[in-house]
Image: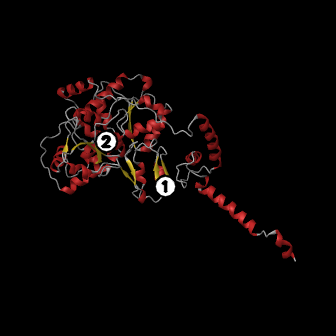
Amino acid sequence: MGHGVKIFNAACKGCVNCIKSCPTEAIRVVDGRVRIIPELCIDCGECLRTCTKKALGMDEDDWDTLRTAGDLQVMSDPTLYAQLGSYRRPGVVRDALSHFGVREVASEVPLAYDVGAYAIARALEEAEPGRKPLISTYCPAIVRLVQVRFPELLPRLVPVESPLEIAGQIWRRDHRDSNLTLVAPCPAKITLVREPVGREKSSFTSVVAVKRVTRDLLASGATAEVPQKPMENIRWLMWALRGGETRHVTQFLDRPVKTMVVSGLRNTLDLLQELELGHLPGVDYVECRVCDLGCIGGIGNAETRFLSEIRLRELPVRWELTEHEFGEVQELYDQGIWKLKVSPRATQSRTLGKNVAESMNRLQKLKKVYDELPHIDCGACGRPTCHALAEDIVRGEGEVTDCIFKLRDRISTLAREIADLSGHVPHTLRNREED
């Protein structure tokens, strides 16, 4: 299973900070090395933020190899346009990339975002009240979080493809055999390319981080003062901000809807838990992003999210569509290019045994082992919780003495036994000592 996070074992110091940040308990530190459980990882990037030893990184493709191969064509996430303070206008950024030797195929992207927003608006209008609120599928980490931790919410995911993938599909119609690289702001969008949800294969052939492209562009000294083709439609750039997607969607609605916008992992977890309990009556749509302030907070960006937010909010956005633009949107919508091919399914949980009988036996053992553990979830064993340690023990992937408190008890017991034994003498010598 392909993921957007990679491990640098040589840099890992076994500090276990990363295991505490993972919302799905997907990380273990065993024998001083980090291990990620692929089926539980949602690629939110929280572990990268907490690892101060640089033992975790984004598993992007090699940018230098892609550039030297020639004929490099990239499609950028909206966050790229907020990274370069010296290039204030989006059209200038595109021209700077061109002078840098990178061809950005951006003409399809604004239309794709319009189609995505229109499809969501239509889904909101057609959804039955019992199915609301619908949940945005724009953030791939949110989709995987629902698959892993909130499977009851899967029917609420709006069945609309990522606009980046919609743009890729439009571009593929005329470039079937060409390579296309996505410039992504986070590990989740790397996984969008490597292991997409809702379709068998991505339209992109490779993926690199926004940070890498931005730094190389700045180091090259590329200049672009007057954009050759100014961007007329920059509505799509607002999707990089918290609330940008919702604002775009409401442009296509004829009536007001009640929406909620949340960013940041902990806030998102709180919201999804409330939603799972049915505590959000009357809400029509939920826009969630695992990164603070939206995609501009992605770990793969070069610029701080606060400056990026200022730059994007200063852009003059024309929200109203022209008649020609709306005609293009309607045409692509009718073609169904926006639909997820396969509905996201719940991630199959890790079973304790190979069959039901073995699983039941191990479940009984797990309860017994867990009852004997201290239940303080300190993480010193390399697992995020005592329950996770108990699971690893019954699977044969850990020992009770991995718990530092159980190890201390075992050492104390051994010490007492050694002290008792030290006072003993062979029976053949006992009478002689008394004499």
Q: Is residue 89 visible?
A: no
Image location of residue 367, percent across then percent down = 63, 43
Depth check: give the residue in front, 40 or 96.
40
Q: Which mark is residue 204?
A: none
Relative to 300, is 423 above or below?
below
Residue at (46, 53) in percent of width and height: 34
Say left or right for 347 vs 354. Answer: left
- Left or right of 329 in this view: 271: right
Q: Are marks 1 and 2 in contact (CB under 8 Å)?
A: no
Image quadrant where one finds the C terminus: bottom right
Dividing the picture into quadrants, the one containing residue 194 is: top left
Residue 388 at x, y = what percent? 55, 46
- Residue 213 position in % (x across, y down): 25, 50
Query: Callout 1 environment at 10 Å: few (<14), some (14 to 19), or many (20+)?
Result: many
Q: Residue 291: give x, y in percent of width and height.
A: 37, 45
* Residues at marks 1 and 2, CA–CA distance in whole angstroms: 32 Å
Question: Which residue is label 1 attached to?
Answer: 16
Looking at the image, which residue is at 31% across and 27% down?
119
Quarter holding the N terminus is: top left
The amino acid marked with disc number 2 is: Leu
Residue 328, picture quadrant: top left
* Residue at which label 2 appears: 241
SS label for mark 2? loop
In front of the other: label 1 or label 2? 1
Which is nearer the eye, 405 or 90?
405
The answer to which of marks 1 and 2 sits earlier in the sequence is: 1
Q: Amino acid under label 1?
A: Val
Residue at the bottom extreme, as displayed: 435
Crowd rating for badge 2 (residues with CA inside 10 Å; few <14, some 14–19, many 20+): many
Q: Is residue 122 visible?
A: yes
